[in-house]
Image (cartoon, rainbow, N blue to C red):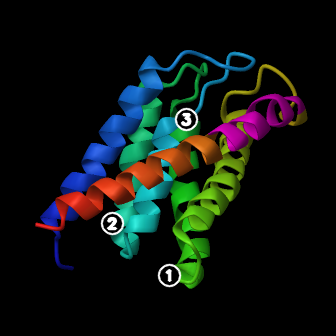
Amino acid sequence: MKMDLKKLIINSLFLAIGVVLNQITPPILFGMKPDFSLAMLFIIILLNDDFKTCILTGVVAGLLAAAVTTFPGGQLPNIIDRIVTTSLVFIAVQPLKNKMNDKISIILTSLVGTIISGSVFLGSALVIVGLPASFKALFITVVLPATIINAIVGTLIFIAVKKSMKVVFRR
């Protein structure tokens, strides 16, 4: 496997930016805030063709999410969530890559990916530590609003990333 240092650095920067934005963003709805690290993970998946790179990024994203989670006992569910979500989203995105408009790709990836992520997180948290409310109630009040917010935020960030990458890599 050829290591592309430039891609690894860019992926690392995206993950770091996602974690920092996650930490400074106040809760918006029902104590829920957009998951910038998840939005950045989806952008990384769209920008990379290598499964190993994406899975490694998913593991790191899971560890970072576990380190900053506010969900009691949410460390292991966050790691499981990011690895499963990265795998499923990567597999789902590959056949459609370069066949869709970038904006449609990030919107669909954010919508489907956030639903997968929220479902896997809640399911694994239910099994491992329990949930403070029913799965259905948390899905409706937290995952669905987060899905909409992540689609909007992810699209805006993706547009900015694509424009900045054109400028940076033009040289």
On screen, 45 above or below 17?
below
Up/down of 131 relative to 157, above or below: above
Of residues 13 and 105, the one drawn nearer to the viewer in this rendering: 105
Residue 41 coordinates in the image, percent (x, y): 45, 51
In the image, residue 95 lies in the stretch drawn in magenta: no
Dot 3 falls on a residue whose secondary structure is loop
Q: Quadrant of the C terminus?
A: bottom left
Mark 2, Cα crowd under 10 Å, few <14 / some 14-19 / many 20+, is some
Q: Residue at x 37, y 69 (%)?
A: 48
Q: Nearer the viewer, mark 1 or mark 2?
A: 1
Q: CA distance from mark 3 to mark 1?
A: 26 Å
Q: Which mark is residue 98?
A: 1
* Residues in magenta, as a range: 137-149
Magenta region, main secondary structure:
helix
Residue for badge 2: 53
Chain-order first, disc 3 or disc 2: 3
Per the image, label 2 sits on a secondary structure element best described as helix
* 44 is higher (above) or lower (below) than 141: below
Q: Name the residue carrying label 3.
A: 35
Mark nearest the camera among 3 and 1 is 1
